[in-house]
Amino acid sequence: ITLTWTDPTAATLKEIKIVWLVKGTDTILGQEVIKKGTQTFTIGGLSNGTEYEIRIHTIDRLGKESAGLVFTVIPHPADRALWQLSGEQQTLAAFTKGLRISIPAAAFAAGTQVTAQNLGKPEQPTDMTLSVLGNAYSCLTVNGEEPAKPLFLALQYDADLLGTTAARQLGIYRQDEKQPGKWIYVGGTVDLFNQRVSVKITQLGTFAVMLRRPVFTDLKGHWGKLDVEIMAARGLAAGVGDGKFAPERPITRAELVTFIMRLVAYSGKELPAPTDEVKVSFTDLAPGVWYGGMVRTAARIGLLRSTSGRFRPNDVATREEMADMLVRALELLGHPTSAKIPPPPFTDLKHASSWATQSIAQAWYKGIMGGMGNGLFSPQGTSTRAQVAAVMVRVLDRLGLLTAITVEKGTLQMGEDGQNYQLVNCAGTDTGYRLRAVSEEVKQQLEELVGQSVRITGLRVQNSSQNQSTPQLRVLSVTKSADG
């Protein structure tokens, strides 16, 4: 059993004394006095399944010993772990950090026992598009309680099994209790540095990291193949039947709303309740159509503009309509529009509808939509299904929902060239980072925070030069650190 703790802050603290014995007996099996600052100790020679009593005492400089804390543990084999929860915020780690669970305060009652087991590599799922990239882990409470608040689960994956496939197609899957060969997609953000996938979960069970390789017969050699496969792997895009995606088909308004609503749901963000002030009564939404529920919900939460009682589901969506919906979706997800932005570099915005010009500018400023070449945005132009998939992947990246790392604290500096940014003095690591803004919005935020202590979330960029050893991040978001 390995014990970890945080030393008391008392200046008089000198040592920590640990005593262990079989529960219900008076015979001390062992004791150890540990220097202040060690904060960890492993007790060996214990028997699996036997309940032990552990006593921890503090000793001050005068040799005075505290009454101490007493708790019980039951050792398990190396492939099992057991924790007794305090009711406060805790992080549980086991199996050489192959499994990590972050538990917020009040998610479980104090005294709740949580068990975890390393089940090894599971058998091939019945869904043949899935490949297993690591061991399966069960995580349950002894008495079957489910969490009152979402937990954060992180599992390591075997990068050697990934091959050349994009890590953004990885996800965490939960095993169906009634059909063990069936695995249900939960989600997942990939940490490429630590080869770990993390996700928010609301129920316990058996989990594993898997890779989905969706197959669409009409994507071979297509420029948008990777983006479409990333969207499909995460359950955000579907084909049109017969194993096809129809990448070059212009997207309809019904399809576009469905794409965006799936993205909003995927973010896990709790949205405001739909307001009764929004009257949703589209005369051209036939009863029972597959997109009806999505469209009505989108209207109620403010994603759609009024269309005089008509939704026009089968009309081809214009680029200005897509920009408007995306900017509204980002606002719902906690990314508000910026008040002061530079003018976008497009020469054809005179052809945009008056209600769309600000949305186009915001979409460009946030780095989620660009031009069509030659200085044109083409506001009345259309987008193909593949183009929309590419934009959606850009939004997911911008939100840090695919692959991202977060540096909780570092000092933001301007580089020696006076043009590029650097992050130095990073908490918990000797590594520094060269920084590149993902959008004009983030670039402006970096300019304003130079010299301050910041928190940065970004994407790892492969070094363009063999001589550049400092890793580079494409910065998705930057804010002042909590104590900065």
Image (cartoon, helix red, strand yellow):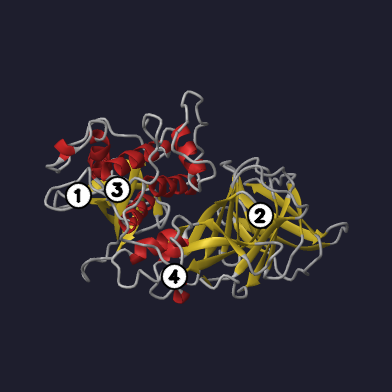
Residue 396, image x, y percentages: 39, 51
Kindly identify the residue that appears in the image at 31 percent across and 34 percent down. Answer: 337
Q: Can the viewer see residue 194?
A: no
Can you tell which quarter of the image residue 333 is in?
Answer: top left
Residue designated by label 2: 204
The mark nearer the N terminus, 3 or 2, is: 2
Distance from disc 3 to disc 2, alpha carbons, whole Å, reads 35 Å
The mark nearer the N terminus, 3 or 4, is: 4
Judged by depth in the image, the label closer to the viewer, 3 or 4, is 4
Residue designated by label 1: 371
| Number of callouts | 4
Relative horizontal placement of residue 7, taking residue 405 as reference (left or right) = right
Distance from disc 3 to disc 4, alpha carbons, whole Å, reads 26 Å
**Looking at numbered disc 2 in the image, what kind of residue is underneath it?**
Leu
Mark 1 Cα-neighbour bin, 10 Å: few <14, some 14–19, many ≥20: some
Q: Which of 367 and 72 is in front in this view?
A: 367
Mark 3 Cα-neighbour bin, 10 Å: few <14, some 14–19, many ≥20: many
**Looking at numbered disc 3 in the image, what kind of residue is underneath it?**
Ile
Distance from disc 2 to disc 1, alpha carbons, whole Å, reads 45 Å
Q: Is residue 395 above or below residue 328?
A: below
Residue 317, image x, y percentages: 32, 45
Secondary element at tag 1: loop
In the drawing, what numbered circle is on residue 368?
3
Residue 16, image x, y percentages: 65, 53
Secondary element at tag 2: loop
Distance from disc 2 to disc 4, alpha carbons, whole Å, reads 30 Å
Marks 2/1 in contact by CB < 8 Å: the verdict is no
Kindly identify the residue that appears in the image at 47 percent across and 31 percent down. Answer: 281
Q: Can the viewer see residue 352?
A: yes
Quadrant of the image for the N terminus? bottom right
**Looking at numbered disc 4 in the image, what kind of residue is underneath it?**
Val
